[in-house]
Amino acid sequence: MWQTRLATASLLLISAYALNCPANYDDIGSGCVYAPDEQLTALEAQVLCHDFQGELATLDRCDIFTDAVHYLEETGGMNDSFWIGGTYSVTRDEWQWRDGSVIAMGAPFWGTADGGTWEPFGGNCTGIFYGDNPYMGAYTCDAEFHHICEGPSTAEGRCNLPFTPVGSQCLSFENATQQSWQISRNICQVDGGDLVTFDDCEQFSIVANYILEHDLQYIDRYWVGGYLETWDTEDWFWLDGSSIPMGVPLWGQFYVGELLPDNPTVERCLELGYEYRHRFNDLDCLELRRPLCMTSPVE
Ligand SMILES: *[C@@H]1O[C@H](CO)[C@@H](O)[C@H](O)[C@H]1NC(C)=O
Ligand SMILES: *[C@@H]1O[C@H](CO)[C@@H](O)[C@H](O)[C@H]1NC(C)=O
Ligand SMILES: *[C@@H]1O[C@H](CO)[C@@H](O)[C@H](O)[C@H]1NC(C)=O
């Protein structure tokens, strides 16, 4: 049955921007998904996704939620129910995705159960359930359903020199010169890139571990594409204007002191440094570091 679905899917899901998806996964435009044939409990489903280098899907954006539902429609999955990666946290009294981010209640993701009651209703695990509607609902975690795994997209084979694929990004660890943050940015731009930014914690983790595995931490510390806009608001931004989350797990700690950033009047550029166990540090923009550049994977 699923073979037929996949054959149909590959015809229907031609997207403008191709991702590199891991083996078994289908590119649905906004992400890489895989719906194995097995019907499993939510916990077993997560283990199986993990065996396939993925996780139960986090459908936390309108685009990936919509694309995933269309994928189920187009592959004949709308008569089945599928676990996805949201669970109720008793300690936080909140619904959360696997990375701990909060699932907002109500529209547009949650449906209504039994002709009117807003989901989540009657269970601690989330899925897209046949019979309800193609929206999210909750169910007891030990029920056995199909499931949607989400895999990491990779930039493998799609980075031009001097960039090298690291997870979903093309990066270049420039070690020729140490420069101020602004000059480092210009160096990246000459190569058609910019200082690196991280959309999510998973990609940040892939990059930090790459630095460790390749012993790059002993070479030097890097400038990355984040800055403090004004000292009086203490809001940090990525170069694209989106905000950088504060606290764990991204920001480091200065020895046994407080969590960084700790000096908004002077230190307004973002460093990735080994002293802070490969987490973020605020630093004076005129200090000299090496640029950690990124560019978009080529088509
Ligand atoms: C779903 O179930 C309905 C009613 O049993 C059936 O008519 C329809 O063909 C099924 N759709 C798919 C894609 O299997
Ligand atoms: C949800 O989890 C809590 C804590 O483990 C449990 O007490 C409760 O019965 C669960 N709810 C359902 C509907 O399974
Ligand atoms: C960085 O410097 C090291 C040591 O000088 C060298 O072995 C390595 O090839 C350099 N890396 C790049 C990307 O230039």
Image: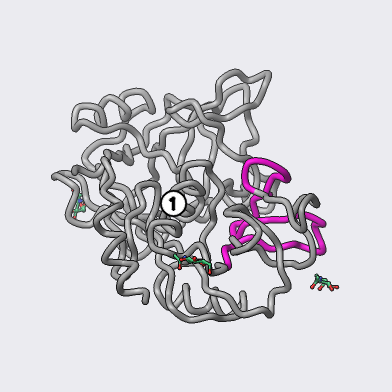
> Which residue is rendered at x = 60% and y = 18% of the image?
230
Badge 1 density bin: few <14, some 14–19, many ≥20, Cα 10 Å:
some
Compared with 152, 104 (above or below) is above
- The count of marks equals 1
- Residue 73, position in %: x, y? 44, 57
- Can you see residue 101? yes
Q: Is residue 97 magenta?
A: yes
Q: Is residue 153 magenta?
A: no
Q: Quadrant of residue 96?
A: bottom right
- Which residue is the extreme one toward the left? 161
Identify the residue under disc 1. Answer: 70
Q: Is residue 173 visible?
A: no
Q: Secondary structure at mark 1?
A: helix
Foreground pick, 118 / 60: 118
The amino acid on which the numbered mark 1 sits, given as a three-letter code, is His
Horizontal placement of 259 versus 170: left or right? right
| Residue that appears at 72% across and 56% down | 95
Q: Chief secondary structure of the magenta span?
A: loop
Q: Quadrant of the N terminus?
A: bottom left
Q: Does 195 appear above or below 275?
A: above
Relative depth, front residue between 1 and 57:
1
Q: Position of 85 compared to 124: left or right?
A: left
Rendered position, 272 above or below 23: above
The x, y position of residue 92, in whole percent, is 80, 57
Magenta residues, start to end: 83-109
